Each structure stands twice: as C-alpha cells, then as structure tokens.
Amino acid sequence: MSAKTSSKGRHQTMAEKADIHELYEESVQNVENEVIFLRETFSERVGRVAHTLREDFCGTASLACEWVKQGPEYSAVGVDLDPSVLEWGRQNRVGRLQTQDQARVRLIESDVQTVETPKVDILVAFNFSYWIFEERAQMLNYLKRCHAAIEDDGLLFMDMFGGPESQEETKEKTKHGDFTYIWHQAEFFPVSNHMKCHIHFKFKDGSKIKKAFTYEWRLWSAPEIRDLLLEAGFSNVTVYWEGEDEDGEGNGEFTPNARGEADLAWVAYIVADK
C-alpha cells in the first residue's frame, strides 16, 4: 500500500500526514536565535561564557539540543512532565545530533516544581509555559526553586507577552509555506486573568488540525513577575524589549528597557540575576 494512502485506500490529507511537533517548532520557535540571545546576554551580564543550561517545560527539547551544538564543553538538561513529547524529542531531536553531542543532553521526565538537577549557568522557561502556575504562592515557590538551581552568577531567562490584545478572545493567523498557524485566545476572565488558548493548523488542501495544542494559563503582568522574582531572592530583574523594523513590526532584537512601549501586543524576555 502506498504511504500516501490511508487504510481505506484514499489519499491522506495534509493534516493527516503532518507532525504537530514539527509544525509547532516551525511556527513558534527559533532556537538558533534563542541560543545566540542566551549566549550573548549571559556574556554581557556575567562576563564569562555560559556552558550549562536547563530547559524547563522543554517539550521536544529543541533548544537544549541546539545549545550543545556549540561545542564539547556545552551540556543541557531538559525537564518535562509529558513522556510522549519527551520520547518524540529523543527520537527526532536528540537522535539527530552528532553522536558526541547526544551524550551531553539529558532529558528528565519530572515536575519542575520538585526536580533536582546539578546547578547550571542558565535556566530557561520559555514559550510562556511557567504561566501554568496560576496561584501566586505556587509561582513564588517555582521561582525560588529556579533561584536554587542556578550557579551563584547564573541567570534565569523567561519570556512573556502582553498588551490590550492579550486580553481579547480572538484568533490570529500566520501563513507558513503549506500551512497556516492559528493562535486562538478562546477564553479570558478578567477577574482571575485565567485564559484558555489553542493552536490550530490549516493546510493548503483545506484540511485542518483543530486544537493541536491547548493551554490554560494565568496572564501574568511584567510588574507581577518582576516583584515575584525579587521576592524569590534574585538580585536584579531586567526586561528585554523587542525593537521595531521600518514597518513598525518586531525585528527580533531585544534590548534592556525599563519602561517598554504601549503596544497592543508585545513579547518580551525577562532576565533575572541570582
């Protein structure tokens, strides 16, 4: 039977043939740029080279794998609760590394609130995943554990988004080659800032993957996270704001900014010094 046909003999749709993890990474992540930002920011702030990294909520561990490609002195740990996505990462990300690089990536199936790992230079919580901690006490406990998990001159990197549009129930579509990425803010409750978001994919042949990913988070603000980080023991917290190109769109370059801009929608990094 042809690989292009289903068990019923018909041709598979693009949605049926697609891999949601590949689609997610193409739509959302740019690990090459993230590694550059991590490396350069650490060097600027700390004055030395960072070699060890822990990626919390690592999912497919694409960032951890990109980190170790820098050379034999670099190592990474990825932590995630989902065994299926970790196995996908082992097969499709770690497994594609050079043999000598594979040994320097360790993936752990565990809860980031309780996991114990050797101290690292950089701890990363990206893709807004830490927003799963909706209660203040739970978030503070997690940030205290991050503080304990990094070296004395280590840094914690997180990202966040905001702006008035982040509180709307809306859909945003972005075209990527043969498919369209759809970010769907399905529910938002202003009293708690609880939000439910989905990622859908639509393909050129009209087929769709609905709710490929679903997230339930609290929409945290920058001042809230900054204050919690300081309460958790971090000595300094800096927000890195994205610059704009000539069309007023984000240019992917992030620099320290104590005030930010009153944009309708924005994405920023938060960097905390131990």
Image: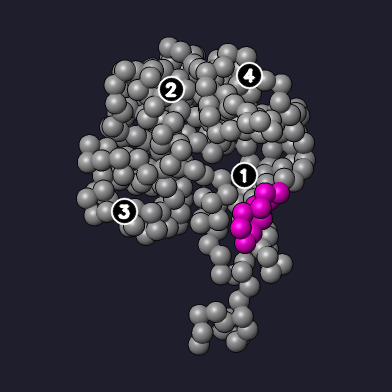
Q: Earlier in the sequence, mark 1 or mark 3?
A: 3
| Residue 111 visible in rendering | no
Q: Secondary structure at mark 3?
A: loop
- Using the image, determine if residue 128 lies above or below residue 140: below
Residue at image point 37% right, 59% down: 91
Q: Check disc 1 and give the amino acid type.
A: Tyr
Which callout, 2 or 3, points to the residue nearer the camera? Answer: 3
Residue linked to disc 4 = 260
Verify whether residue 179 appears in magenta: yes
Q: Check disc 2 and give the amino acid type.
A: Lys
**3D distance between C-alphas at marks 4 and 3:** 38 Å
Residue linked to disc 1 = 215
Q: In what quadrant of the picture does the C terminus appear?
A: top left
**3D distance between C-alphas at marks 1 and 4:** 26 Å
Q: Earlier in the sequence, mark 1 or mark 4?
A: 1
Which callout, 2 or 1, points to the residue nearer the camera? Answer: 1
* Label 3: few (<14), some (14–19) or many (≥20) C-alpha neighbours in 10 Å: some
Q: Is residue 191 left or right of residue 244?
A: right
Residue linked to disc 2 = 144
Q: Secondary structure at mark 1?
A: strand
Q: Earlier in the sequence, mark 4 or mark 2?
A: 2
**3D distance between C-alphas at marks 2 and 3:** 33 Å
Residue linked to disc 3 = 97
**3D distance between C-alphas at marks 1 and 3:** 30 Å
Residue at image point 55% right, 56% down: 23
Stretch in magenta = 173-182
Q: Secondary structure at mark 2?
A: helix
| Residue 64 visible in rendering | yes
**3D distance between C-alphas at marks 4 and 2:** 26 Å
- Using the image, determine if residue 219 lies above or below residue 12: above
